[in-house]
Image: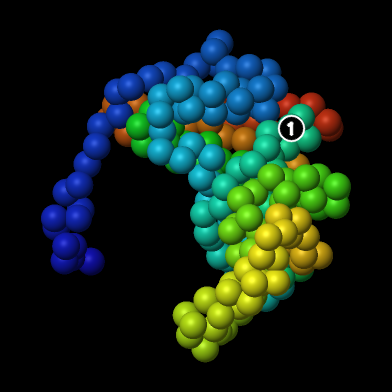
Amino acid sequence: MSIQHKDIAAIRQDYVLGILSELDVDRDPVRQFKKWFDEALHSEVIEPNAMVLSTVSADHMPSSRVVLLKDIIAEGLVFFTNYESRKGEDIKANPHAALLFFWPELQRQIRIEGVIDFVSAADSDEYFQSRPKSSRIGALASPQSQEIPDRNFLENRVEAIENQYNGNDSVPRPSHWGGYLLKPIYFEFWQGRASRLHDRMVYKKVSGSWKITRIAP
């Protein structure tokens, strides 16, 4: 195969900002994740809670999209979405999913794999009510991932709901919208190193405990 776009193939970035060793990592991957997440926050990474969520449909077709992490708890990572969206339908058919964080400012990636479950209705209600009113109205208005005729269709639905709740801040959470919890069984912490000899530390859950290994770049 001849490379047609040599200008793209020539793009390179060497990684020299940090190292990651077996002696440095926490024995618990959630604590290690929190440590790196805090460093991303303090380093002013743009949207450090943005993560790629990958799911697989009932007919085995993978898909990925960026969603926002909204909580880190001992059991795993929490995000919120429309249960009737494409990702919601995928999760219903196959609860196994993967997350990817990429923080180029720190030359770091974190890969997480696990099984997705619902968060409680009470937790979904609490988070929904913490959102700006406009975002709550948007969640009611948008039939996420469904085909719509045009932009006006969406804007008209928003206007109708705004009129319905004019002067009333109590916009209820729709039953098709709420939180998911990814319960991890695999973490990989990736620290970029020079000459593509990156550090990759892996946590795998084995018989209820975390086993830590290094894998080759």
Question: Residue 138 lies in what quarter of the image?
Answer: bottom right
Q: Is residue 136 above or below residue 32?
A: below
* 6 left or right, relative to 95: left
Outermost bottom residue: 149
Say which element carries label 1.
Answer: strand
Name the residue at 41% across, 19% down. Answer: 19
Please, is residue 202 above or below residue 86 in the view? above
- Given residues 31 and 187, the one toward you in this image is 31
Quarter of the figure that contains the C terminus = top left
Would residue 23 be visible to someone looking at this image? yes
Q: Residue at x 56, y 11 (%)?
A: 23
Regarding residue 141, the answer to whether it shows in the image is no
Total number of numbered discs in the rendering: 1
> Is 106 above or below relative to 70?
above
Q: Quadrant of residue 145?
A: bottom right
Tell me where residue 149 appears, x and y as whole percent.
52, 88
Q: Is residue 34 above or below residue 170?
A: above
Of 57 and 133, the residue lying toward us: 133
Q: Residue at x 40, y 29 (%)?
A: 44
| Amino acid, disc 1 | Ile
The residue indicated by pointer 1 is 73
Question: Which picture quadrant has residue 192?
Answer: top left
Q: Is residue 7 left or right of residue 39?
A: left
Question: In the rendered view, how is the structure colored?
Answer: rainbow
